[in-house]
Structure formats: structure tokens, C-alpha cells
Image (cartoon, rainbow, N blue to C red):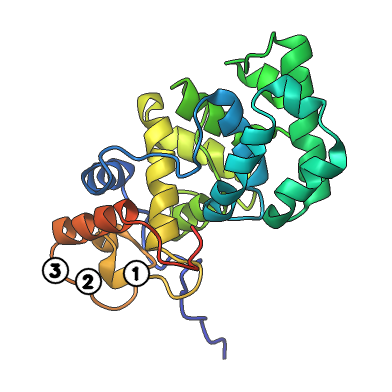
Amino acid sequence: MVTRKKPGPEQPAGPPANATDVHDRLSVALPQPRCELDHKDAWTLLVATILSAQSTDRTVNTVTPLLFAKWPTPEALATAPREEVEAVVHRTGFFRNKAKAIQGASLAIHTQHGGKVPADIAALVALPGVARKTANVVLGVAFRVASGIVVDTHVMRVSQRLGLANAATADKVEHELCARFPKDQWIDIGHRILLLGRYTCLAKGPKCADCPLFELCPSREGQALGSWQDRAAHLGAAVAAPPAPGKGK
């Protein structure tokens, strides 16, 4: 006798959520989603995004003020002593690789692009240390260019639980999501799904009862609290509130 495994958070039990409904509810919850990496321009965002790999935005935001105070331009960072850069970015993890990447990207920006971050996906991914996810972040946030949908671990988890994507790699998940959402929604829906994953649809112990997408989600568990509008307001308030001391974002 074969016993069927009970569906879990990564194993949707029902039909996929409707992309239009997902967009509409998350638009109510997060009408103006924003990148939580502190930055002042495309270059500082690019550097912060590289540093955020395998780290938290909160940690990166404690490192970049000193980094950009010491080396405020791509040229200055590119020509800084490597060991000094490594010391500043040490707390973000993988500090040697990250120091090499942000200096290499900054050097290319200075020597090949006149000190300006290119607003082009091909030129961005040609920079050292810049993969497609980083390029999508910079293009979407700094330039409002919809080159694709940002897919990180949060977006992969949430889109799989919702049944919006089935692939196991970020590039393929991005392709699936881009096929489901109109291009003019790509920038904001990526950030909204990311924030939902960061604050509600957690990797361990997802807060299904508080999720504004509860009724749409084939992976939901338990019972929802209040109306979806109430839950949307709760998510919006959580994102807007500063993180508690010691809590990463």
C-alpha cells in the first residue's frame, strides 16, 4: 500500500493561485514597495546588492555607510587597498569574494562607462560580480526599467508555494513569473512577493493565518485571521515598521 505524503509548504495541494488576484491583493498590502537596501544612486545600490548575497539587508545597511564614506565614488572604491575594503565588508560574509566583486564592478564602471552605471541588462551582467538578479534590482529600482522579475530565495519559495512557478532555479522561476505577469508589473510584483516572503511566508513557520493571499494559496495551512484586507493592512504595517533589535531583514 502506498501512502500519499501530505502536501507541505513547498508541495501545493491545489490549483495555482491566480496571478491577477495575487497582484491585486499585494498591491493593496504594499502600494509602494521599496527596496530595503539603503542607497542614494544606482552605483551604491549595485554595491549594496552584491554585498547582500548570503546576508541580510539589515547587515548590509550597517556596513555601507562607512564603505561609501571612505570611498564615495566608483574610482575611489576601485583603487582602494583590497585588505581595507575586506575589513569594512567583513560582516556581510564571503568578504574576500565580495570585496573583489565590488572593486571589479566599480573599476569597470569607472573605466568603461564614465563612472555611470549602465542602464542596460547586457552591460550590467558583464560587470564583475553582477548576475541577473543584481542587474534586475538595479534596473528596476534605480532606472525603473523592467528587464525581468527579481528572484531571490524569498521569491522562489513564495512563487512555488503559490503554484506560480515549478522550476528549481532562479532563472527558470523568473521566466515562469514573467509569463504570468504583464511586463508593466514586473518591477513591483517582484518586490511585493519578496516582502511577503520576508515578513509573512517564512521559510520555517510561515504565518499563513496572517497572509493576505491565504484564500488563493494551494499550500495554506490552518485558518485565516480576519478579512484579506485586514491581513493586507497587517503586512503593510509590518514592512513599514523598523525591525526589532537583532532581527535581520
Find disc 3 in the rendering and name its residue.
226
Q: How many discs mark residues in the rendered view?
A: 3
Circles 3 and 2: CB distance less than 8 Å? yes
Q: Which residue is mark 2?
A: 224
Residue in the image at 81% along x and 31% along y = 80
Q: Is residue 116 above or below residue 94?
A: above
Which numbered circle lies on residue 103? none
The three-letter code of the residue at mark 3 reads Gly
Q: Alpha-carbon neighbours of circle 1 within 10 Å: few (<14), some, or many (≥20)?
A: many
Using residue 128 as the reference point, say whether residue 119 is left or right of it. Answer: left
What is the x, y in percent for residue 39?
51, 34
What's the CA distance linking mark 3 and mark 2? 6 Å
Circle nearer the viewer, 2 or 1: 2
- Examine the rendering and report whether any part of residue 128 can be seen: no
Q: Amino acid at mark 1?
A: Arg
Ranked by sequence position, the earlier of labels 1 and 3 is 1
> Which residue is identified by label 1?
220
Residue at 69 percent of width and 56 percent of height: 91
Give neighbour class at mark 3: few <14, some 14-19, many 20+ (Cα, 10 Å). few
Q: CA distance from mark 2 to mark 1?
A: 9 Å
Viewed as shown, does residue 148 lie left or right of 210? right
User: Could you tell me which secondary element the residue under label 3 belongs to?
Assistant: loop
Asked if marks 2 and 1 touch (Cβ < 8 Å), the reply is yes
Which residue corresponds to the image point at 69% horizontal and 17% vertical from the top-left? 123
